Structures are given as structure tokens and as C-alpha cells.
Image: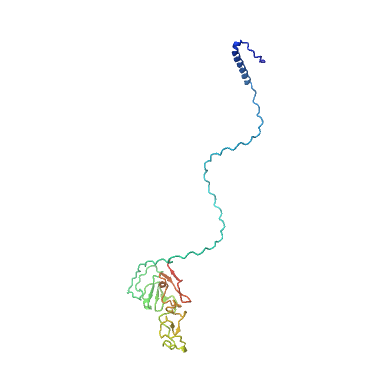
Amino acid sequence: PGQEGPKVCVLPSTNRFLCRVASYWRTAVIHIWHSTNKGSIGLPGMLGQKGEQGPNGEPGVPGKRGPIGRPGKRGKQGQTGDTGIMGPPGPPASGNTHGEKGLPGPPGRCDCSSILGANNAPFGSYTQRGGPSKVPAIFVVNSEEEMGRLNVDNTIAFRKDQRMLYFKDKDGWKSIQPFQPFQSTEKVPDRVGVCGDGKVQAQHGEECDDGNQIVTDACLNCKWAYCGDGYRHEGMEECDGKDFGYQTCKSYLPGSFGQLRCTDSCLIDSTGCKYFT
């Protein structure tokens, strides 16, 4: 098309409104025609400079808790620490250290052929209970005659006349301890010279003479009693040598067993007595 000519409206002045409408339509048609004949899109321009960092946003909502992880491996054992200082001793225990004595057990059974006396041992047809290798009991007899009437194998007998232990097997009775003279508290050794007449005779070596055979008083075989003479001084000594005044662990500490010991001060030492646990 050619160049646009001057915008001249040739209509009468009364129709100027229609002239303006026609002019608008013409301008719109020309604009549509130019827009349909646009060229291709050009290349993008260069990247501009980075702008300033904006303000921080508000904190977000916390997420859910994740699952628990697997337990780790056990670490190596550390070195042993130094030994600590020993603490002070604790307070002493209150009450009796030993328990109460238990009830007596049921009586044993014995099929004896003779009546038991105060000093007799149960002998005769004793019914042996248990295996053949076990010792059923320890019998106390007064003489060899009573010991010979015990019809039990693998048993032990104590002869009061010799104060010795015997063991019986298939070969008969045999002593199981060497003969040791027993320290008696009932019989004093034979007196020497004129000791015992009640008169102190220094020329015969007498220190005293009470005229009796009592070994538990202050005068023993015309010598003054002292700790270590082998005889317990009544009221002054608890023991002396092997003389404990017929005391044993069982009588000294009821319910215990073992052997008493006499100290150098003639006092009883009961540390050898034990209790059943």
C-alpha cells in the first residue's frame, strides 16, 4: 500500500461522529496488519548483575523426628584404676555370732543283745546301716572283753582302761594310735621320802607338806604349785598342760567340736573349737 494520506473527513459537520468512528476502525486495521507481520524472536540479552540479598524469611515448621539409629559397637575396656585406700573398720556386730542350737535328732536304732548300763558300750548283734566302707559309730568300752563282744566290722572303739582307740576290720582289732600316758587329775605320783607327813622338811627338798594327795591345791608333791607343772590349780588356773579339768570344746562352748589349747599363762584357748555350718 502507499503512504497514508491526510486524515480529511469529507462528510458534513453533522456527521463528524461517524467520521471519527471510521478513523478508529482504519487505525485498528492497520495495527492488526502490522502485528501479523512481526519478525522472529531475537536472542536473549546478557545476564544482568546480581542483586543484593534479600532479608531472611521466617523459620519453617519443624519436621517429624526420624527413626532411632542402630546401637554402636562396644568400646574397648579401659585400664584398671589404682587400688583405693582401705576404709575404716565397720562397727562390731551386734548379738551372738553363733546361731541357735538346733533341735536334737531322732534316736538311733540298735538291736543289742544285752542291757546297756551307765558305763557300758552297745555291743552284741548291732545292726549295721550303710555301706561296708563306712564307720557306723565309735563305741566306748571299759575293757578288752567288752570290745571283743562288738560284732561290727569297720568300726572304732575307745578303751577306757587304756585310753586308746582301736579299729576293727577283717583281721580283727588293731590300735590306731600309739600309747601315751594320760595325765590324770585324780591320782598324785608316788611320794618321795617322807613327803606327806604334814611336816615341811627342807633337808629333803620339801617346799610345803599339806599331808594330802589332792593335786589341784597349792601344794603338789611337797612343791608349791606353779603354772606349767602339768596340774590345774583350782581357782588359780583354767588349765595346765593337758589338764583342762575335764573340760572339752563341747562343754566349754556348747554345740562346738575340736580341741582346747592351754596357753603359757595357763588360760584356755578355744580358737580350735569349731561349729558346724
Q: Nearer the viewer, residue 154 or 270?
A: 270
Residue 37 position within the rendered picture, expressed as x and y whole percent measured from the top left: 63, 21
Above or below: residue 11 compared with residue 86: above
Residue 154 position within the rendered picture, expressed as x and y whole percent measured from the top left: 40, 71
Q: Residue furthest top?
A: 12
Looking at the image, residue 53 sits to the left or right of residue 260; the answer is: right
Residue 187: quarter of image: bottom left
Residue 7 position within the rendered picture, expressed as x and y whole percent measured from the top left: 64, 14
Above or below: residue 255 compared with residue 81: below
Q: Nearer the viewer, residue 272 or 4?
A: 4
Q: Nearer the viewer, residue 218 or 43?
A: 218
Residue 13: quarter of image: top right
Residue 217 position within the rendered picture, expressed as x and y whole percent measured from the top left: 42, 81
Q: Residue furthest front?
A: 13
Residue 193: quarter of image: bottom left
Numbered disc total: 0
Looking at the image, residue 131 sits to the left or right of residue 264; the answer is: left
Q: Residue at x 38, y 75 (%)?
A: 140
Q: Quadrant of the N terminus?
A: top right
Q: Residue at x 62, y 19 (%)?
A: 31
Colour scheme of this structure image?
Answer: rainbow
Q: Quadrant of the C terminus?
A: bottom left
